[in-house]
Amino acid sequence: MFQSGKELENLFYTEAAFYKLQTHREIQICRSLVSISRIGAEIEGVDALFVLLNPGKCLPVAGEDSIPLLSGEVAELPLMPATPDNTLYQLMRLMERLNWNSVQVINLTDLRTGKFDEYKESQRFMKQWGDSRHTIFSMNRYVELLDCMEQTDTVIAGWGTKASIIPAAENAYTLLWEVADIKGLAYKTHPLYYHPFPWLQNKCIKWLDDMETQLKRTVEVV
């Protein structure tokens, strides 16, 4: 079964922490954390933490004008109601299969970009100006990363298979592996992992099937 976005929004609600980041006179929209919860469920902990590449089209329900300019610590930003995108819908489908009530999502970068070329350009720009505030995998946000990881026993990587992200993926993998046993559908090149939403529906279903099998096998072993 491949539920529609409308069906999924009747089952789950989405909240996220957004901020605007100013670097060398340029302001960019960022999202640091997403929380997906089952409507009406008693939430007892986080079932899984997903680590993806970058935020997609998800925005606050209240619109872009409600996003504050960052003036303090990213970790202190409040969660606000948010509109899910295709990737978040895909995670909800996995939650339905596994009967999960709560998951969280972080990314290799908080910078919200729609296309991969925009992602690469944003990373080049931030590196040029020496600004690492956009990534939870920078050392000055390490406590924030640990706090996210300590809320769950299941960490799932899905940051994609593009060769150009390998340096960022290696950095994230090293920090995550110190604390957690990383799950996910590994690509042939380490440490890349297939993204949850590969656009084509048959490939989306395959990701769900393979991920469900992996996670259920892990539970059975334990």
Image (tube, grey):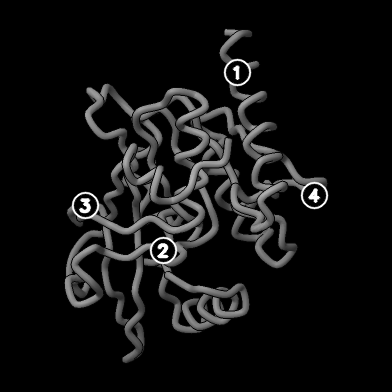
Q: Dot 3, how many residues are within 10 Å of its Cα: few (below 14), some (14-19), or many (20+)? A: some
| Mark toward the viewer: 1 or 2 | 1
Disc number placed over residue 43 in the picture, else none: none
Q: Which residue is mark 1?
A: 216
Amino acid at pointer 3: Leu
Q: Which residue is mark 3?
A: 79
Q: CA distance from mark 2 to mark 4?
A: 24 Å
Direction right: furthest residue: 188
Decide if residue 29 is on the left or right side of residue 211.
left
Where is the N terminus found, in terms of image quarters?
top right
In the image, 57 versus 164, the foreground residue is: 57
Amino acid at pointer 1: Lys
Amino acid at pointer 2: Asp
Q: Dot 1, how many residues are within 10 Å of its Cα: few (below 14), some (14-19), or many (20+)? A: few
Q: Which residue is mark 4?
A: 189
Image-quadrant location for residue 31? bottom left
Looking at the image, tell me whether mark 1 or mark 2 is earlier in sequence order. Answer: 2
Amino acid at pointer 4: Thr
Relative height, residue 93 to residue 138 (above, below): above
Residue 144: % across, % down: 32, 46
Residue 218: % across, % down: 61, 17
Q: Which residue is mark 2?
A: 110
Secondary element under disc 1, as helix, strand or loop, is helix
